[in-house]
Image (tube, grey):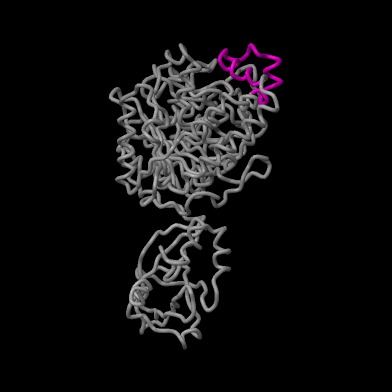
Amino acid sequence: MGDMTIEGLLADYRAGTRKVRDVVAEALAEVRRADARNVWITVLDDVEIERYLARLEGMDPGALPLYGVPFAIKDNIDLAGVPTTAGCPEYAYVPERSAFVVQCLIDAGAVPLGKTNLDQFATGLVGARSPYGACGNAFNPEYIAGGSSSGSAVAVALGQVSFSLGTDTAGSGRVPAAFNNLIGVKPTRGLLSAAGVVPACRTLDTVSIFALDAPDAMRVLAVTAVHDPADPYARKDRVPALGLAGMPVSGFRFGVPAAGQLQFFGDRDYQALFAAAVQRLKELGGEAVEINLSPFLEAARLLYEGPWVAERYAAIRDFFDARPEALVEVTREIIGGGKAPLAVHAFEAQYRLQGLRARAETIWDTVDLVLTPTAGTIPTIAAVQAEPVRVNSDLGYYTNFMNLLDLCAVAVPAGLRADGLPFGVTLFAPAFRDRELLPIADRLQRAAGLLLGATGRPAPDLPALGPDMHHCIPVAVCGAHMSGLPLNHQLTERQARLVQTTRTAPEYRFYALPGGPPERPGLIRVGADGGAIELEVWLVPSDRFGSFVAGIPAPLGIGRVRLEDGSEVPGFLCESVAISDATDITDLGSWRRFLATRA
């Protein structure tokens, strides 16, 4: 197989060096070979594939964002005309239409190759709870692939497809990514539609994305993060209510759990690899801040020890009651436990969760994101089969709390053990920070210097992802709103972030206006007879920009300010009529210097 990254494929298609039919035929041939790892449940035949290929005939490869890109679908997500089993043959049905996210991908030119193996009814983090066989790790089939989205991860890691869809309720989109050296995106709940997905816990589920690298994951996220008004749990992408805006790819603060809260279950390699990942993130410009992980860990225990297991029972109640023998034993025991909780238990757990959520949210006052291991160790399939509940519980130590606490996350490859098995870390942040995490994940993956998945191929030489600022508006400030000055709180209380200290182009006059407190300057563009004035550029969340501007008194307002590099950003300017009683301080070049002379 050649380069299976999305960016690599699209470049080859545009150059004419590869053809969609050839790539898909080669991928299908690979998939249809003996499936020793139990990756696939259903592979499309040539007739089924043809309808996806035919629509691309004669089309410009640049016309669609995923033109001719092969992908895999976890078999609890619908593909029209193909059975959905959820890992249980007796449960299978044939949907008339594809899941909303699958249709988004097909409309974007992607070509589905089939449906992949999973822990039955998406209940597990191991990939070994399936009547279709335990899914073997891409690096060593004696070890687990992770679950429940096991087959989707291994298909990408082996280079059989360019990306795949999984689901993630408790870690199923992150643990398999870590164990197979992949990027695993667990989006904010409701960012991707769950219509056409067999639910595990309907209030917590999210479709997830597996990719070889972060640029590919970003491309798939851009196609699938479309609001679906038919999904009652869909949420429109919006500015986060917590955290700081416009997370930069350097100069960020990342939380690291206190040493006593880290668990590696005796795996010294994983422990050392995590320490190396922390150091790597520091070298990339991050500042490590020790945090208390206890409210997150307490929330994690609620997922299986609390009444949320009743949601798993509710999801398949009619089938479970009619055909309990159809379920794998451990899955039957877990889901059957969902019959026991009472309504009062659900409310008590909600109260408990709300308290933990309030405690957890306080960390966002001090950090932009958190770094943890994705899992503390990687077990063999034999170890899972010997102790299926305990081992699975260990694997959820760093993952089970994410959706309960409404967080987004990206699993990132971060090294290999001495025996060659992958280790991964997870970056997580408040809801709707998904696009801001991926550029940091991209830099962290590149810094690790690993080959892609289990393909043996190096990462393509592509520009690094830049910070996502589509939620924010830059504002240039040159006076009392600057850091440490009297009106700076008007920015910080709106979760704005300082991103640049610079100067204007040399074409402005600068004045100290009468009045106050606080004292304020006025910036007026004059052209040739001007000077360069020191200022700061802050990113303000777009939904808070209006309230910020509404509080600006005359004669000040927001206009376009030209910076010394020639770029322009919104910023404070002054009406020229206001300078008749003002003091010209252009020669000082800085409001801080003016204040110093006054002191």
| Residue in the image at 49% along x and 22% along y | 393
User: Where residue 36 appears, x then y in whole percent?
Assistant: 43, 17
Give above or below for 566 relative to 210.
below
Q: Which residues are magenta?
A: 313-338
The main secondary structure of the magenta stretch is helix
User: Where residue 39 appears, x then y in whole percent?
Assistant: 47, 22
Q: In this orientation, which residue lies closer to the viewer: 208 or 260?
A: 260
Q: Residue 551 sits in which quadrant?
A: bottom right
Give above or below for 490 relative to 96.
below
Q: In this orientation, which residue lies closer to the viewer: 256 or 47?
A: 256
| Residue in the image at 43% along x and 25% along y | 30
299 falls in the magenta region:
no
User: Where residue 99 appears, x then y in whole percent?
Assistant: 62, 35
Horizontal arrangement in the rendering, residue 566 relative to residue 105 (left or right): left
Horizontal arrangement in the rendering, residue 111 relative to residue 467 (left or right): right
Residue 380 seen: yes
User: Where residue 278 appears, x then y in whole percent?
Assistant: 33, 39
Figure quadrant of the N terminus = top left
Give above or below for 193 relative to 305.
below
Number of callouts in the render? 0
Horizontal arrangement in the rendering, residue 466 relative to residue 187 (left or right): left
Q: Residue 564 sits in which quadrant?
A: bottom left
Residue 1 seen: no
Q: In this orientation, which residue lies closer to the viewer: 124 or 72?
A: 124
Query: Of all residues shown, which one is farthest toward the bottom?
Result: 580
Q: Residue 47 sits in which quadrant?
A: top right
Figure quadrant of the C terminus = bottom left
Query: Of all residues shown, which one is farthest toward the left?
Result: 418
